[in-house]
Image (cartoon, rainbow, N blue to C red):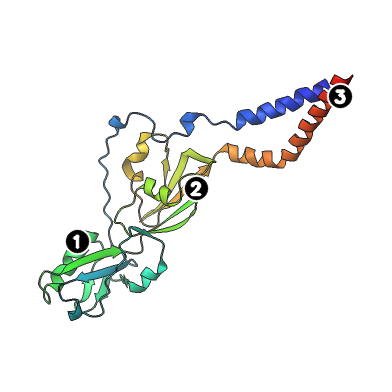
Amino acid sequence: MNKIFKYAWLLILFGFIFSCTPQKKIVYFQGNAGNVNDSSSFELTLEVGDIITVDLYTINPDAFPGIGISKDHATIVDNRSYYEKGFTIDKNGKVILPYIGEVVLQGLTIPEARNLITEKFKAFLDDPVIVVKKLSFKISVIGEVQRPGLYYVLNEKVTLIEGLALAGDLGNYADRTNIKIIRKTKDGSIEIPIDLTNQSALTGAARYLHPDDVVYVAPTRKKAFSQISIASGIFTSIVTSLVLIGTLYLKTK
């Protein structure tokens, strides 16, 4: 009976120890923030297959019916209806816009595209105001986050931290030192390792997400242990009950 008590308490102690996580593995961006020196930059460019909106603002909007003016300027949306209002850049890098016809936008940044379209509309209007947004900027956040899924971005830039915030932050079993950005390049896919417990996560290539990036958050080893713990929960309860019964039995003798 004493051996049963011993092994039972060891089992309980073992589970308690492995359920604890050191603080240094939980806290984000450890270190001296004053030492972070980030010279990285990211400019979103338009490519073949991208979908954009072109909104025209003028003192006489009735002069150009057919060019939609978006009323919703939310920075982050998950609304596929926006695609119905967009223009797709074709295989030749062009879009066809009402009144001004074909415009080559491939390889241009959003400000460059806006300036080019504005100049073309000046042939018809005085001081037109053009707003260009890319609708096909989407990212995927999967793994140990609260709300894994596909997210659409209307901002020209979105950081890794903002992308994780869209997914509701990391889950209880997320390994903050083992996050990957899977990014498409002209030469194929690359993986960028991220350690959110380090200030370096705020700098370099990982700072800004690119269109079609996949952010994967790996689980900790505790998750596997927790699944084992669930499976052995009944066993632990039985052993604990036996310990209590045995203790009461010995006290009565």
Image height of 50 relative to 142, above or below = below
N-term-proximal mark, 3 vs 1: 1
Residue 55: quarter of image: bottom left
N-term-proximal mark, 2 vs 3: 2
Image position, residue 20 (x, y; %): 57, 31
Calculate the distance from the C-alpha at mark 2 to the C-alpha at mark 1.
36 Å
Position of residue 138 in the picture relative to residue 69 (left or right): right
Calculate the distance from the C-alpha at mark 2 to the C-alpha at mark 3.
48 Å
Image position, residue 197 (x, y; %): 42, 35
Q: Nearer the viewer, residue 16 or 38?
A: 16
Q: Could you say whether the residue bearing mark 3 is in a helix, strand or loop?
A: helix
State which mark lies toward you, 3 or 1.
3
Is residue 77 shown to the viewer in this render? yes
Residue ID for mark 3 = 249
Q: Residues within 10 Å of mark 2 (few under 14, many from 20)?
A: many
Calculate the distance from the C-alpha at mark 3 to the C-alpha at mark 1.
83 Å
Q: How many marks?
A: 3
Image height of 69 relative to 176, above or below = below
Instruction: Identify which amino acid the numbered label 3 is placed on.
Output: Tyr
Position of residue 101 in the picture relative to residue 212 (left or right): left
Q: Quadrant of the C terminus?
A: top right
Q: Residues within 10 Å of mark 1 (few under 14, many from 20)?
A: some
Residue 145 numbered tag:
2
Image position, residue 15 (x, y; %): 66, 31
Residue ID for mark 1 = 112
Q: Could you say whether the residue bearing mark 2 is in a helix, strand or loop?
A: loop
Picture residue at 25% right of the left edge, 65% below the top: 132
Instruction: Identify which amino acid the numbered label 2 is placed on.
Output: Val
